[in-house]
Each structure stands twice: as structure tokens, then as C-alpha cells.
Image: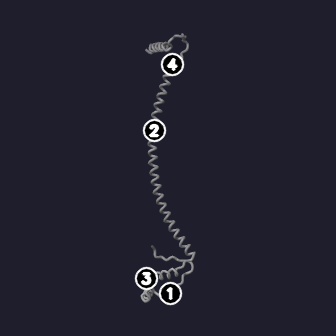
Amino acid sequence: MNNHSTHVHGKRPEKRDLSTSSIDLEVESKNNKISDSDIMHTCNSQIINHIQLSEADLECISQKMHALFKADLEDMVRSVVQAFISQVITGINASLNDKIASLTQDYSHLKNQVAELLFQADRAEQYSRRNCLRITGIPEVSDEDTDNIIVMILLLYQNYHHMNLV
């Protein structure tokens, strides 16, 4: 707490009479048999009567108090929000890291499945082309085994070709 005095605007209260001190009141109380509570009440009443603040003074005090409370409240809210944001970001990062790990594992699994399916599709395509060979110039009879004829032609071609190479 600082010891600086605050300039008060408006009308200054009248100076109190210093001719009667609290010591004089105590002596007077002993003579008149006044109780301590009566003395305190009298002193408080005198002090309250001497302190008078104008509306401008009250407004100035109110504004300064508001500014002080506002700054303290803003600092407190800022620190709470920053701590909360830090916790939220940590939670979100952990959740995102878990999701990324899960998606990476799913991606790897799906990539392997795609490779296997491509291999199977290639094999099926090769197998389906086996019967798609078209040979022209050879007459076909209705009850013939065309696969057997093709195999024999290829064997004859291979033997002929093998003989020419030797």
C-alpha cells in the first residue's frame, strides 16, 4: 500500500476544531460519567460530519477503483484462459496423434490389400487370355478339341524352330 495522497476534487471540508482533543473528551467523560461507546459514537459522528465528498469525487474514486479491478480481473482471466488453452491443446494433440497413428495403420493395411488385389486381377486377366488366341487358316470341325490342336501346332513350331537354330 502506498503512502501517496490522492488529490480530491471539489469543495474541501471545513477544518475541524482542534481545541477539543480526544484526551479532553476522556477527561470530560470522567467528569460527566460518559461511557467509552458514547465517546466512540461521538468521535465517529464528528469524523463523518467533516468528511464530505462531492459527486465528482465519488465518480473519480469509482473510475479509479473500476480501472484497478478491471486490470486485475483481466490478468486473472488471461492466466486462467491460457492455462485452459494449454490443456485443451495438449488434449487435442494427443487425440490427433492417436488418430494419425490409426489412419497410418489403416493406410498401410489398405495399401497391402490393393497390391494383393492388383496381383490377383493380373493373374485372372492372364488366365482369361489363355483361350482368346485366334488362329486363322486352319479348318475347324464341330467336335474337335481346339486346345489340343493348338498345343500340337505349337509343339511342331517349337521343334521346327529348334531345328533351324541348331
Under tag 3, what secondary structure?
helix
Instruction: Please give the residue where the numbered disc 3 appears in the rendered image.
Output: 36
Q: Residues within 10 Å of mark 4 (few under 14, many from 20)?
A: few
Dot 1 or dot 3: first in sequence order is 1
Instruction: Please give the residue where the numbered disc 1 appears in the rendered image.
Output: 17
Answer above or below: position of 73 versus 38. above
Q: Residues within 10 Å of mark 2 (few under 14, many from 20)?
A: few
Q: Tag 1: residue type?
A: Asp
The image shows residue 97 at horizontal and vertical percentages of 44, 46
Give the quadrant of the C terminus. top left
Of badges 4 and 3, the one in the foreground is 3
Residue occupying the far front of the picture: 33
Dot 4 or dot 1: first in sequence order is 1
Of badges 2 and 3, the one in the foreground is 3
Dot 4 or dot 3: first in sequence order is 3
Cα–Cα gap, marks 2 and 3: 87 Å
Instruction: Please give the residue where the numbered disc 4 appears in the rendered image.
Output: 131
Instruction: Please give the residue where the numbered disc 2 appears in the rendered image.
Output: 106
Of badges 4 and 1, the one in the foreground is 1
Q: Is 56 situated left or right of 93 in this image?
A: right
Q: Tag 2: residue type?
A: Asp
